[in-house]
Amino acid sequence: MPLDPKTVDRLAALLRQGATNRAIAQAAGIDRTTAARYRAQLGFGPAPKRPAPNRSPLTVEQKVMTLIRPVGGGHAEWTGRRTKANGTATFTHHERTYTARSIAFRAHTGREPVGYVTAECDRPDWCVAPAHLEDEPGRTRARGALAVVTGRATSLVECSRGHATAEHRRYLPDGGPYCGACHAETKRAREAAA
């Protein structure tokens, strides 16, 4: 049964104010299905979601810092949860899951990480100190400099399989160079054989 024009005008006013279907139903004395039908007929989008009552006022960067505890030597340990599969430090913020190292890196550097974020210190398996974290370009730069200092740098422009070293060169933590493309190909071949 259609609503009278006065009620429809009231519904339109409530919709413009951002009211939910439930609020409209209570205010106008109609059911939520009718409120939803008139929302669509009057050209308004879906009802806005109510914010969760326990929604954190912290930003994602602020929240990650609450779960990091400083320990000796400038290191920091993760006090939040870890994944069962590989122990990656993770947390949830506003119904979305993040890895702790990527957000701590972003909080420290002000930019999104490129590739994986790892700790480049003497405690790489557990340290989450923002100052110790590096993404792929940072690791390559730091390890390349170590290769030069330790005399392990190479002047080759291609690897033995023809991959350009300028694009594919990577370094081990001790500064030893290797070809990232060859490494990826070998890994794919191993996985295909398994």
Image: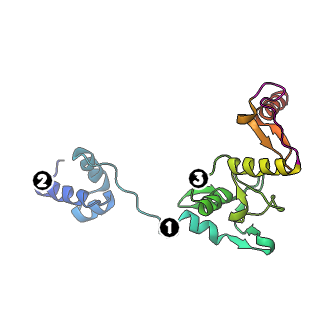
- According to the image, label 1 marks what residue? 55
Does residue 109 lie above or below 71 as drawn? above
- Front-lying residue, 101 or 170: 170
- Which circle's residue, 1 or 3, is located before the other in the chain? 1
Q: Camera-side residue: 183 or 95?
A: 183
Q: Is residue 132 magenta?
A: no
Which tag, 3 or 2, sits closer to the chain's start?
Answer: 2
Question: Contact, CB < 8 Å: mark 3 with mark 2?
Answer: no
Between marks 1 and 2 in the image, the one whose residue lies nearer the viewer:
1
Residue lying at 73% horizontally and 56% vertically, measured from the top left: 88
Name the image quarter holding the C terminus: top right
Left or right: where does residue 129 sit relative to residue 13? right
Disc number at residue 97? none
Residue at mark 3 = 112
Q: Percent position (x, y) of residue 188?
A: 78, 31
Asked if the residue under mark 3 is in contact with the one under mark 1, i.e. CB atoms within 8 Å, the reply is: no
The amino acid marked with disc number 2 is: Asp
Residue to which mark 2 is pinned: 4
In three-dimensional space, the C-alpha distance between marks 1 and 2, rounded to whole angstroms, equals 39 Å
Q: Secondary structure at mark 3?
A: loop
Mark 1 is on which residue type? Arg
Q: Earlier along the polypeptide chain: callout 1 or callout 2?
A: 2
Q: Residues within 10 Å of mark 1 (few under 14, many from 20)?
A: few
Work out how far the residue at label 1 is from the one at label 3, CA to CA, in angstroms: 24 Å
The residue closer to the viewer here, 144 or 56, is 144
Query: Looking at this view, is 40 or 82 the one in front?
Result: 82
**What residue span does the magenta drawing correspond to?**
151-163
Predominant SS along the magenta part: loop
> Mark 2: few, some, or many residues within 10 Å (few <14, many ≥20)?
few
- On the image, the x and y values in percent for residue 58 come to 52, 69
Asked whether residue 154 is drawn in magenta, I would say yes
